[in-house]
């Protein structure tokens, strides 16, 4: 599913910052992987590269057999539209759009017919348990509900890869547990490959595999004991 | 895209209604100015043409001559073969005693013979007109259109007071015309009277303004023209009415096309307001853009979203602008009409309706201005990467593009603009537009790096002036180069216009005042008419002797100006007793000298020409001007080229003796009266007034009064340009307000932190005011040289294109002084609302802003 080979990422500025330094990784289809590491270890940069939001300074980022580093801006946008979906810690919902409109957004961008959009949106909202909240604005929802909207938006395109950047970071324990449980069921029932950044050991334990980063390098990569509960 | 527009864009509009209104205002201001100017221009031109056409009736040809057509020519024309009917006409624009009724066109015609030429639909119980002889026997008889009569509340038998050179005169309504055909001329503000009564009323002597000719059936216009021209000689013009209309259009064309500068500037203003507003929108919506991009929106989709918004704003603003333009255009038409009447003696009247062509042009320009303004920000939006959008503060602090290519392109374009101005490869409007556009784009490209450098230089000064608030202002300005340079750009361009146009107007006026001081040196001016170009009364030549006999009068010169068409332009041929004039005036000679002019004009029948005549026709000393006179075509050798501002079309001066000899017309426009030293001009003026009272209409002015009147005419000519200058200052004001509102919004978090750290409201407020002052100051510093160059361009090549005069360049110090006083006040005012917003921000809310 995902293969990163000798990936380097540096940011130029007054002082050059190396975010990733020679990453080599392979993630198979249907895996659920947690990435952990201290602040500045390169977790978010790695996730951005996997989703084609950014390109490496050098190296290969192969997703579904396609090297994202060689893709144009437009090519990467089209790739994101169909092959990958995101969940952010800060949700990144459009504050002025209603729940159903937020979920429908990627389908509108892809030019999906209106009738099909309505069906798909209704289905995923039911799946995440928000079918009674379709006309609410994000401000009218709790943090957990907002993250469910973000998950519904990620599911609606049926993308095989789901990237989650600290999905429980802004939530209390109970709401966090609900989200993790939802992600696990998505993984189990849809076979979606999930890569999740987290600071939380409990969240990481929901995954089957844990990759630890430090100073832009893979420090440790292995199965989570008792993971994937 | 429709979904995004309906949801994202619409919700942004709802949340930021004030900013959206401001954006819309940008298009509305531009389109309103453009459409009102274009509508007024078209109505004026159409009004002139339709008045000529309608008044002409069934006339195939019209015969005119400078100074008027002698009465006896009517018989001569009537006897020519191919001529079916002739009708003498006198045309005069007057105002009613109650000036608010507007101008009234008086047509003097021979009612007995005119029915072959024009159809009169009389209305009501017009018993007087059943017997035209009775009508003619009463010289105060007048016929009005039904519309005009209704507006004034006039019935048959009522009298109407007209303001005439001889004073207020009453005329009696003895008939009403149905407002169709002929009666629709001059927007229906028409009064018909007997041609011979009109001769007396308007001092035409035994002359008509023209003779209308209807040809026999089967005689072509070409044949008729040839027959008449052959019989009458070259001093007479034989033209079709439509050609005469075209001629008039050409005359006012230069004046009205000068308004295009204002209209172009207004559109540029609109574009900048849109640019600014979209910059704000992109800035505020960058997280939404980031989310869209993360969800798979392509750069093109993002760009299309913003451009679609611009398109909608353009269409909406264009429509509102068209409506507002129609409302303003009537006033503008009145202003243009008054000036063309004063300067060219040509009047057009009418009610402005928005012509479909102008509406379409305005809408298209509104859309274009909107798209051009939004293009840059839309491009920036499409390039925002999701990672950058989600990172706090990265977008704001990003410098706008690479400096080196921008500076290079700016320098090249600015250089091209200067080169074009110095060595014009083409002429006319294309030349002016190419210089202004390349110069403006060059300046826009250079403003960003320049403003950055200037801001860095200003930082220590501001910090020194107010250690805390100054530091905060400097940080805000340098921290967001994109926002600062956008505002400074609008500011610099506006102030460049202010300095350039203001400098040009100042230079023109001061040059003309200097010229008046040098040339208008006699003590009193005795005129029969207030209109300089189309006098409604002329004095007899013999009056000079009477004036000379007034106690205290030392010398009198008789000035007569006629305006013949020369190579398609209506030039001025001025005649006066040149010997006396040269004794008391100080002409500035561009070619030749006073001695050559004196002997050439007074002894040899030669001529002198004005600088703009020389510029327009390329004729100077050693060459000849060929003029058609009643004595035939005469070649006048040129002995001098002098600086003179009597006519913007060019002037030729001859001695009065030459004029009398060749034109056989001794009538006089103005008597220049010099008084004996030690005599009180006021007393002599009163004596002259007393002497002429009841005999002639006479306006007797002292030198200063006369100059003041000319000064007012110059001011009227530049009225719209002055409005443009105010508009430019308004734009600068709006630019600062927008920029500071963005600044406060963007710095909400920073302001919250500062408050948490103990900053007092006064420091926050002062820092925002300081930001405004620095923006204005940097804009002004950039505009100083640019405005000077623009003023030079206006005074030189532009003035020469429109008037043939080149004005000597002088730095607009007075405007600069006014700006130095007003800009800080304007900037502080512009900062008022944003500063209040900043001060009132709650610390806790502000900290969580992002």
Image: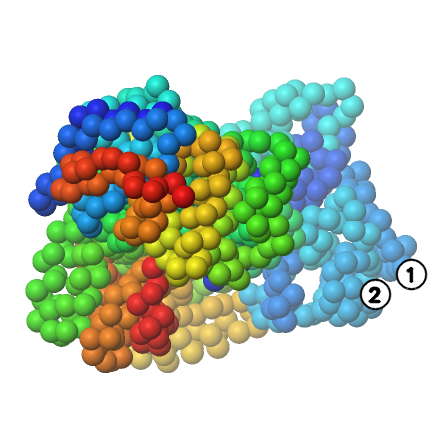
Residue B353 x %, y %: 65, 49
Residue at image position (63%, 71%) is B98
Residue count near mark 2 (Cα–Cα under 10 Å), binned few <14, some 14–19, many ≥20: many
Of B521 and B207, nearer the camera is: B521
B689 left or right, relative to B493: right
Q: Is residue B452 visible?
A: yes
Name the residue carrying label 2. B156
Q: Quarter holding the C terminus of chain A? A: top left
For this view, does B36 lie left or right of residue A89?
A: right
Picture quadrant where residue B814 is located: bottom left
Label 1 sits on a secondary structure element that is loop
The answer to whether mark 1 and mark 2 are in CB contact below 8 A is yes
Which quadrant would residue A118 be assigned to in this image?
top right
Q: Position of residue B228 (x, y in %)?
A: 62, 27
Residue B286: image tag: none
Element under label 2?
loop
Q: Is residue B268 left or right of residue A140?
A: left
Which residue position is annotated with label 1? Answer: B125
Sequence order check, earlier mark of 1 and 2:
1
């Amino acid at each position: 599913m995902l293969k990163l080979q000798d990936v380097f990422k540096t940011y130029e500025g007054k002082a050059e910052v190396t975010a990733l330094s020679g990453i080599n990784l392979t993630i198979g289809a249907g895996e659920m992987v947690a990435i952990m590491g201290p602040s500045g270890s390169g977790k978010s940069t790695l996730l951005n590269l996997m989703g084609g939001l950014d390109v490496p300074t050098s190296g290969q980022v192969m997703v579904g057999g396609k090297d994202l580093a060689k893709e144009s801006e437009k090519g990467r946008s089209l790739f994101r539209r169909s092959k990958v979906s995101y969940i952010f810690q800060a949700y990144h919902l459009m504050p002025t759009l209603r729940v159903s409109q937020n979920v429908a957004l990627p389908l509108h961008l892809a030019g999906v017919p209106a009738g099909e959009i309505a069906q798909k949106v209704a289905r995923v909202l039911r799946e995440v348990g928000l079918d009674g909240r379709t006309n609410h604005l994000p401000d009218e929802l709790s943090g957990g509900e907002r993250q469910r909207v973000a998950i519904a938006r990620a599911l609606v395109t049926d993308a095989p890869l789901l990237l989650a950047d600290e999905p429980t970071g802004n939530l209390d324990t109970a709401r966090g547990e609900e989200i993790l449980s939802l992600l696990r069921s998505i993984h189990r029932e849809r076979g979606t490959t999930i890569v999740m950044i987290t600071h939380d050991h409990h969240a990481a334990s929901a995954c089957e595999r844990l990759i630890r980063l430090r100073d832009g390098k893979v420090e440790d990569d292995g199965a989570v004991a008792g993971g994937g509960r | 895209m429709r979904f995004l527009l309906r949801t994202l864009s619409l919700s942004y509009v709802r949340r930021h209604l004030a900013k959206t209104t401001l954006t819309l205002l940008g298009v509305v201001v531009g389109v309103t100015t453009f459409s009102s100017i274009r509508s007024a221009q078209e109505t004026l031109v159409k009004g002139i043409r339709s008045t000529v056409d309608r008044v002409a009736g069934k006339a195939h040809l019209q015969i005119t001559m400078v100074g008027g057509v002698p009465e006896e020519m009517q018989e001569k024309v009537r006897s020519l073969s191919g001529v079916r009917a002739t009708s003498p006409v006198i045309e005069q624009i007057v105002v009613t005693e109650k000036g608010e009724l507007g101008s009234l066109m008086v047509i003097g015609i021979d009612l007995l013979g005119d029915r072959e030429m024009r159809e009169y639909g009389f209305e009501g119980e017009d018993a007087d007109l059943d017997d035209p002889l009775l009508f003619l026997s009463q010289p105060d008889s007048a016929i009005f259109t039904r519309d005009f009569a209704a507006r004034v509340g006039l019935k048959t038998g009522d009298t109407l007071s007209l303001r005439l050179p001889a004073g207020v005169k009453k005329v009696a309504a003895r008939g009403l015309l149905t407002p169709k055909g002929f009666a629709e001329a001059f927007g229906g503000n028409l009064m018909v009277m007997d041609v011979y009564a009109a001769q007396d009323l308007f001092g035409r002597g035994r002359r008509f303004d023209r003779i209308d000719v209807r040809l026999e059936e089967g005689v072509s216009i070409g044949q008729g023209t040839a027959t008449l021209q052959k019989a009458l000689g070259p001093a007479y013009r034989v033209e079709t009415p439509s050609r005469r209309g075209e001629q008039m259009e050409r005359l006012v064309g230069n004046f009205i096309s000068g308004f295009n500068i204002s209209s172009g500037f207004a559109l540029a203003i609109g574009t900048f307001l849109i640019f600014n507003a979209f910059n704000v929108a992109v800035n505020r919506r960058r997280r939404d853009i980031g989310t869209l991009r993360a969800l798979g929106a392509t750069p093109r989709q993002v760009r299309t979203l913003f451009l679609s918004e611009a398109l909608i704003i353009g269409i909406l603003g264009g429509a509102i602008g068209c409506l507002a333009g129609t409302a303003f255009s009537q006033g503008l038409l009145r202003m243009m009409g008054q000036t063309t009447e004063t300067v060219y003696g040509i009047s057009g009247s009418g009610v402005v309706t928005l012509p479909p062509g102008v509406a379409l042009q305005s809408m298209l320009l509104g859309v274009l201005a909107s798209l051009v303004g939004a293009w840059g920000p839309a491009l920036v939006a499409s390039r925002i990467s999701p990672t950058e959008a989600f990172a706090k503060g990265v977008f704001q602090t990003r410098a706008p593009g690479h400096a080196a290519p921008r500076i290079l392109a700016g320098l090249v374009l600015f250089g091209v603009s200067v080169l074009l101005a110095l060595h014009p490869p083409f002429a006319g409007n294309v030349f002016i537009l190419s210089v202004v556009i390349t110069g403006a784009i060059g300046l826009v490209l250079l403003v960003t790096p320049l403003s950055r450098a200037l801001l860095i230089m200003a930082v220590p000064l501001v910090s020194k002036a107010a250690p805390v608030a100054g530091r905060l202002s400097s940080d805000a300005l340098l921290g967001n180069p994109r926002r600062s340079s956008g505002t400074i750009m609008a500011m610099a361009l506006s102030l460049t216009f202010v300095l350039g146009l203001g400098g040009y107007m100042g230079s023109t006026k001061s040059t003309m005042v200097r010229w008046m001081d040098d040339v208008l040196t006699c003590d009193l001016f005795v005129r029969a008419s207030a209109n300089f170009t189309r006098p409604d009364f002329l004095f007899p030549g013999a009056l000079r002797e009477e004036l000379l006999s007034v106690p205290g009068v030392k010398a009198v010169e008789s000035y007569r100006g006629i305006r013949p068409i020369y190579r398609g332009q209506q030039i001025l041929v001025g005649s006066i007793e040149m010997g006396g004039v040269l004794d008391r005036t100080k002409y500035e000679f561009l070619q030749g000298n006073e001695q050559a002019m004196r002997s050439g004009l007074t002894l040899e029948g030669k001529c002198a020409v004005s600088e703009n005549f020389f510029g327009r026709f390329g004729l100077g000393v050693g060459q000849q001007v060929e003029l058609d006179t009643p004595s035939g075509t005469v070649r006048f050798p040129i002995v001098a080229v002098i600086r003179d501002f009597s006519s913007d079309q060019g002037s030729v001066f001859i001695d009065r003796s030459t004029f009398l000899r060749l034109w056989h017309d001794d009538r006089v426009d103005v008597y220049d009266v010099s008084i004996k030293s030690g005599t009180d001009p006021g007393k002599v003026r009163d004596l002259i007034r007393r002497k002429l009272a009841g005999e002639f209409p006479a306006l007797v002015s002292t030198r200063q009064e006369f100059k003041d009147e000319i000064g007012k005419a110059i001011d009227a000519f530049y009225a719209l340009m002055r409005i443009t200058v105010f508009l430019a200052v308004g734009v600068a004001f709006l630019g600062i307000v927008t920029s500071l509102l963005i600044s406060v919004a963007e710095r909400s978090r920073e302001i919250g932190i500062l408050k948490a750290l103990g900053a007092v409201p006064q420091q926050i407020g002062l820092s925002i005011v300081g930001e405004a002052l620095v923006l204005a100051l940097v804009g002004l510093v950039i505009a100083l040289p640019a405005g000077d160059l623009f003023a030079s361009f206006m005074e030189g090549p532009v003035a020469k294109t429109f008037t043939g005069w080149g004005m000597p360049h002088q730095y607009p110090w007075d405007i600069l002084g006014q700006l130095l006083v007003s800009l800080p006040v304007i900037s502080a005012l512009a900062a008022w609302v944003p500063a209040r917003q900043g001060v009132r921000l709650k610390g806790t809310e502000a900290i969580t802003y992002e």
